[in-house]
Image (cartoon, rainbow, N blue to C red):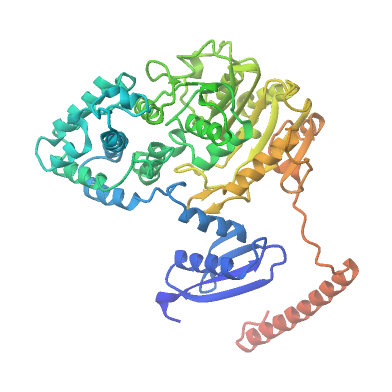
């Protein structure tokens, strides 16, 4: 076989082990995987659960297990218009990155680009409104009120993208960009202190900056057709994914994958009330909450948004992200640490959504030993997981609910008193639902993750009385691979998980709930106690049912034992032959 085409793929039935198809002669692991996925979509039934193995000769180099429908869903998602993780202009951005990488570090480049993307976004939206006003008989396209009425930022002439692009080749482009940012902040008070204004610094190559402006100028961002609901957050996710190793930071600290945010929001349904995120990152939770309300016919004015973010650059990004879509939010007057400078001390929220940094060790816990928030136990100094949990419980209203992401270890850890805190939370009957997530969902964070849902009052009248009950969902086998290292949940899977929870808690219009082995289980408080107060879904849901092949058990055992006897005989014959050969060579044993 040609060594350049040495990879092959093999598809087997996951339940029976039967080999369904094999195909050789691929140049790479990726090419072989793509070939197998295409074959599965083309030739196999959607409900088939298969294992795809990539081989280098006889050696297995890659393996994945999925239902064929996941590959079909992934293919659909890749072809959708700018609605997933792929925005369609990553390659253009990366071309610019190749030019700039040698001239500044990754974090610096990321924020240079984000400021320009924001400027291009609001300039596009402004231009679209400007052109529409020019066509109206009595409208003045230079009247600022015409823009504010449509939730569009006023962009002064010196900050409009065509002006900057016309001057992109000038040595003064850095100062012109800073002046543009200053002018936008001057005329739009909600953006005061938010935009980057350091483009004139000597260390920023002005020729490269001009090329970057030209490049971004070719991408439609703020016009109606191109407008994407979480575009800044998703651009930010893209840069985190590309530069996480260079920056040495965890992607999960700054941006939660869109599918995870959607699942959190679909689960707790923040229709009306106070919504809070104590570590809001780029504000994706708030953006998705707004989308959810719009999709379900609610009114945006029915929710009040509160947030906090400790990283100053990320806080500014959140302000930009919310400002673009006109979401009124109280993120505090500046960035601040939720543990040591709680900007919303008196807030009691109806909905709390969060993705705290996993296993945070340097949270300053030694200075907060007697804090009022630690009602269920003092969290360990070396890990902030249970500090985050109790901070959120503290801020829940009497009928509030919270959904948040944490590392899997939080469900079972007994180190440094964490097991005792978890026991106290369980005995207070706060745990409503636990979900084990699939691997590879988060950029730059390989730690397995889970979702916690805590309800202050399980008999609040909105749903059925769920006291002394907890729903466990094991979603570890869900999701489809977008590439070799990144997995996403499909729309259908998000609907299945959220629908299971809604049925379990007794929502009007939801399906009737039933336990599904291997996927979901409604457990009692006694069940949790029997499992040592551990909340890992795999302990409760059991194994999934294997399809019955119709062969009676006695007949199957007779067939299998006969086959085993035949293999024993072959083994004995092979052993005898080996011994004989060794003896002839003078090495008898």
Quarter of the image holding residue 64?
Answer: bottom right
Q: How many marks?
A: 0
In the rendered image, the vertical position of residue 13 relative to residue 472, given as above or below? below
Give the percent coordinates (x, y) of residue 212: 22, 44
Against 453, is 45 above or below?
below
User: 115 or 420: which is nearer to us?
Assistant: 115
Instruction: Say above or below: 221 vs 187.
Output: below
Residue 569 coordinates in the image, percent (x, y): 78, 80
Q: Is residue 453 left or right of residue 428?
A: left
Residue at (51% x, 26% y) in the render: 300
Q: In this rendering, does residue 544 appear at all?
A: yes
Residue 108 at least partly seen? no
Please, which residue is most extreme toward the right here?
Answer: 554
Kindly give the residue lying farthest to the bottom in the view shown. Answer: 584
Quarter of the image with the N terminus in it: bottom left
Left or right: 272 as drawn, with respect to 127:
right
Residue 302 image offset from top left, x and y in percent: 55, 22
Residue 463: % across, % down: 74, 27
Residue at left offset 61%, top offset 61%: 68
């Amino acid at each position: 076989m040609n060594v350049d085409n040495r990879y092959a793929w093999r598809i087997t039935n996951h339940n029976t082990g039967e080999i369904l198809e094999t195909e050789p002669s691929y140049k790479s692991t990726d090419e072989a995987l793509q070939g197998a996925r295409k074959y599965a979509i083309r030739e196999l039934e959607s409900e088939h659960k298969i294992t795809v193995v990539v081989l280098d000769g006889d050696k297995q180099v890659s393996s994945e297990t999925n239902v064929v429908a996941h590959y079909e869903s992934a293919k659909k998602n890749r072809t959708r218009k700018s609605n997933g993780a792929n925005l369609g202009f990553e390659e253009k951005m990366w071309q610019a990155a190749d030019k700039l990488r040698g001239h500044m570090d990754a974090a610096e480049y990321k924020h240079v680009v984000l400021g320009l993307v924001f400027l291009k976004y609001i300039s596009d939206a402004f231009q679209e409104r400007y052109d529409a006003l020019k066509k109206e008989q009595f409208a003045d396209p230079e009247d600022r009120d015409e823009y504010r009425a449509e939730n569009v930022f006023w962009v002064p002439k010196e900050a409009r993208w065509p002006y900057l692009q016309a001057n992109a080749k000038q040595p003064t482009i850095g100062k012109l960009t800073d002046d543009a940012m200053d002018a936008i902040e001057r005329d739009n008070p909600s953006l005061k202190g938010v935009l980057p204004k350091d483009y004139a610094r000597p260390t920023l190559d002005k020729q490269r900056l001009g090329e970057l402006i030209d490049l971004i100028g070719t991408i439609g961002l703020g016009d109606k057709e191109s407008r994407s609901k979480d575009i800044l957050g998703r651009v930010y996710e893209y840069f985190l994914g590309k530069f996480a190793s260079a920056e040495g930071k965890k992607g999960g600290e700054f941006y939660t994958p869109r599918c995870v945010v959607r699942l959190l929001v679909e689960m707790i349904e923040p229709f009306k009330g106070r919504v809070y995120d104590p570590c809001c990152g780029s504000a994706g939770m708030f953006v998705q909450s707004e989308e959810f309300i719009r999709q379900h016919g609610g009114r945006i004015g029915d929710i009040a948004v509160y947030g906090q973010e400790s990283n100053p650059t990320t806080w500014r990004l959140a302000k930009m992200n919310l400002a673009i879509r006109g979401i009124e939010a109280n993120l505090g007057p500046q960035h601040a640490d939720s543990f040591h400078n709680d900007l919303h001390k008196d807030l009691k929220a109806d909905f709390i959504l969060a993705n705290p940094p996993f296993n945070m060790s340097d949270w300053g816990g030694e200075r907060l030993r007697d804090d009022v928030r630690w009602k269920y136990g003092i969290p360990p100094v070396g890990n902030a997981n249970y500090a985050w949990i109790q901070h959120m419980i503290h801020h829940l209203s009497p009928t509030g609910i919270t959904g948040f992401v944490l590392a899997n270890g939080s469900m079972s850890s007994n180190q440094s008193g964490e097991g005792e805190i978890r026991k106290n939370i369980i005995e207070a009957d706060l745990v409503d639902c636990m979900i084990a997530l699939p691997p590879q969902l988060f950029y730059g964070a390989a730690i397995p993750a889970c979702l916690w849902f805590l309800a202050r009052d399980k008999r609040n009248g909105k749903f059925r009385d769920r006291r002394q009950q907890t729903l466990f969902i094991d979603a570890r086998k869900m999701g489809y691979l977008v590439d070799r290292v990144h997995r996403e949940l499909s729309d259908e899977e998000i609907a299945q998980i959220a629908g299971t929870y809604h049925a379990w808690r007794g929502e009007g219009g939801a399906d009737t709930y039933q336990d599904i082995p291997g996927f979901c289980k409604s457990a009692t408080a006694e069940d949790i106690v029997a499992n040592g107060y551990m909340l890992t879904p795999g302990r409760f849901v059991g194994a999934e049912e294997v399809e019955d092949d119709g062969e009676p058990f006695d007949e199957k055992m007779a067939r299998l034992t006969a086959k085993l006897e035949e293999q024993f005989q072959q083994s004995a014959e092979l052993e005898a032959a080996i011994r004989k050969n060794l003896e002839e060579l003078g090495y008898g044993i």
